[in-house]
Image: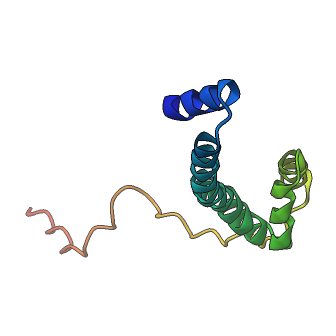
Amino acid sequence: MNFLAMILQDSLQNPSDAVQQSVQHAMMMMIPIFMVIGIICLAVILIPFWFICKKAGMSPWLTLLNIIPLGNLVLIYVLAFAEWKVVPVAQLAPYPGGYPPLPPQNPPAPPVA
């Protein structure tokens, strides 16, 4: 980054064609890198929201609100306060007690007289 700043500063003081071309080449090399980083950042944000919207019973296309500035804030409020169209999971019967029942035992012997 310091190299780019030095080239830009030099191009302002001495505007030669070679320096201008080197600055243009450096900027042109950086554009695809920034585009790839931007696409990765969008994927990191959009994919979880896509699954959250699907699980909430809403259209997953609402995820595209994240691309609009402050659209993600709108989407978070929609998800927080909307009625989710999800059927609750049936609860399993809890285990009755700490220990299983005792096995059958022989009846006690009659008292001897």
Q: Nearer the viewer, residue 81 or 63?
A: 63
In which quadrant of the rendered view does residue 109 lie? bottom left
Residue furthest to the left? 112
Where's residue 18, x and y in %? 58, 45
Where's residue 104, x and y in %? 25, 76
Where's residue 46, x and y in %? 71, 61
The number of numbered discs placed on residues in the rendered structure image is: 0
| Residue 102 drawn above or below residue 75 | below
Q: Residue at x 77, y 73 (%)?
A: 87
For the C terminus, which image quadrant?
Answer: bottom left
Where's residue 69, x and y in %? 88, 47
Q: Nearer the viewer, residue 37 or 16?
A: 16
Query: Left or right: 109 with respect to 47?
Result: left
| Residue 72 drawn above or below residue 111 | above
| Residue 102 drawn above or below residue 16 | below
Q: Nearer the viewer, residue 98 or 31?
A: 31
How is the structure coloured here?
A: rainbow
Query: Left or right: 104 with respect to 34?
Result: left
Q: Residue at x 56, y 69 (%)?
A: 93
In which quadrant of the rendered view does residue 91 lie? bottom right
Q: Residue at x 65, y 58 (%)?
A: 35
Q: Nearer the viewer, residue 78 or 101?
A: 78
Query: Left or right: 80 with respect to 106?
Result: right
Q: Residue at x 57, y 55 (%)?
A: 29
